[in-house]
Amino acid sequence: MQYTLGSIGVLTGLSLIMLSCDSSTSKEAEKNPVADSTYAPVETKAANTDYKPAFEGQTRIAGVKTSTPYDVKVLSEGLDRPWGIAVLPDGRFLITQKGGTLRIAAQDGALSEAITGLPKVNSNGQGGLLGITIDPAFESNRMVYWVFSQDTPNGTLTAVAKGTLAADEKHIENAQVIYQATPAHKSSLHYGGRILFDKEGYLFVSTGERSDIVTRPQAQDLNSALGKVLRITTDGKPAPGNPFEGRSDARPEIYSYGHRNVQGLAFHPVTGDLWETEFGPRGGDEVNRIQPGKNYGWPTITYGLEYSGEKIGDAIQQHEGMEQPVYYYDPVLSPSGITFFSGNSIPEWENNLFIGGLSSIHIARLVIKDNKVVGEERLLEDQGQRFRDVQQGKDGALYAVTDEGRLYRIGKK
Ligand SMILES: [Ca+2]
């Protein structure tokens, strides 16, 4: 398949900003001379609510279209419910499968046999073997870290484990669970499940609030690990320097709170900020820039409704002391894995955020300037796939996996 999309567009909003900019954006324009032309917003369906955004551009931003030619290739169709991708130092991919095994994919898509030896997962509903990352010193220690849904006597929970990838790459050795996001609950939904290392060598892990009305308020409870972004050590202890360290009324592993179900985590390549995506209910999927100790509002504020169409809580969207999403979706995208594009193999993609969409069956490309979304494009909408994760490979291309079992390469021709 080959996509060569037209570059002729109307010079409106975004281009004008580029022309009449201050010194900081001038520098950016010099570095990245490919300015996107802008089009009508990509979302044309009616919203579920009449809620108003908190600021201009918080939803339904102008559309953009990639003008640099790029290829889309299906490298494999042989994965079994893939969920998370970790890029290995040699350029291959370590991919989780929901049922509880790993596969290694070569850059041409050739798959290994299933890698076993991980603790048993509960793969009912949204559970299973979820996000994965490798140790910064993987080349010397072969350590792998992952998130999964674990059975306990009181129900299931989001757990974090680590182990060593054996030299023969057929199994994980010495697997051990290092963290449990308690309390457990009898639900098969909203496990969160992404994991990544920060520059200091600590692990960010995302959880969910397990979906039920009874557990939902725990997203606001600093004595619960549900509905949080957590920061822990490689031994599962609270990372030093966390915002609630030393407080008796809060768990010290919490980094941010008030989240519903966070399946996307990525660092901005320039600012180093942590960004996340989370599922809203009916409407209200969010893109957030995460700052330590901040409250992201769920379920007190939301741009969505219950699936029944009922209002949530007091039906408010803004509240003092609660952070606004950088961007929200109504109707929803169902955002799973995310990544920022770095490098300039496709110049207009540099520092853009790419979001794997499940129900929306596309990859969303968001152009971000000064921590605001200024353009949106839908990629691969013709593929009919639920995009579960998207990561950037060592060759600079994007690699994505789908619930249907495909591995895609999307990159420079
Ligand atoms: Ca929120």
Image: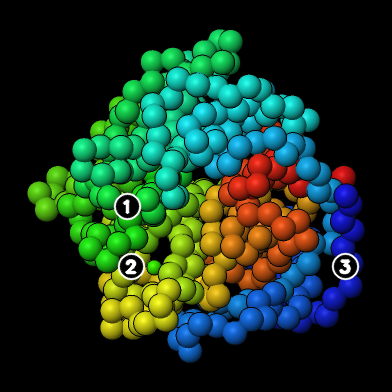
Q: Callout 2, which amino acid?
A: Trp
Q: Callout 1, which amino acid?
A: Ser
Point out the frontmost of discs 2 and 1.
1
Place of residue 389 in the rendered image (x, y in percent of width and height, measured from the top left): 59, 47
Ligand 1, by image quadrant, is bottom left
Q: CA distance from mark 3 to mark 1?
A: 48 Å
Residue on which disc 2 sits? 298
Q: Does 393 sit above or below residue 275?
A: above
Which residue is the extreme one toward the bottom? 50
State left or right for residue 35 relative to residue 141.
right
Q: Does 151 sit above or below residue 23?
A: above
User: Which residue is drawn at the image coordinates 63% and 54% (left, top)?
Assistant: 386
Which secondary structure, mark 3? loop
Disc 2 within 8 angstroms of ligand 1 (CB): yes
The one nearer the camera, 347 or 375, is 375
Residue on which disc 3 sits? 7
Label 3 environment density (alpha carbons within 10 Å; few <14, some 14–19, many ≥20): some
State left or right for residue 74 relative to residue 213.
right
Q: Quadrant of residue 121?
A: top left
Point out the frontmost of discs 3 and 1.
1
The answer to whether the residues at label 2 and label 1 have Cβ atoms under 8 Å apart is no
Place of residue 332 in the rendered image (x, y in percent of width and height, measured from the top left): 54, 70
Place of residue 59 in the rendered image (x, y in percent of width and height, measured from the top left): 56, 76
Which residue is the extreme one toward the left? 248
Which residue is the extreme one toward the front? 124
Q: Does 137 sit above or below residue 247?
A: above
Point out the frontmost of discs 3 and 2.
2
Residue on which disc 1 sits? 187
Q: CA distance from mark 3 to mark 2?
A: 40 Å
Q: Callout 3, which amino acid?
A: Ser
Which secondary structure, mark 1? loop
The one nearer the camera, 27 or 324, is 324
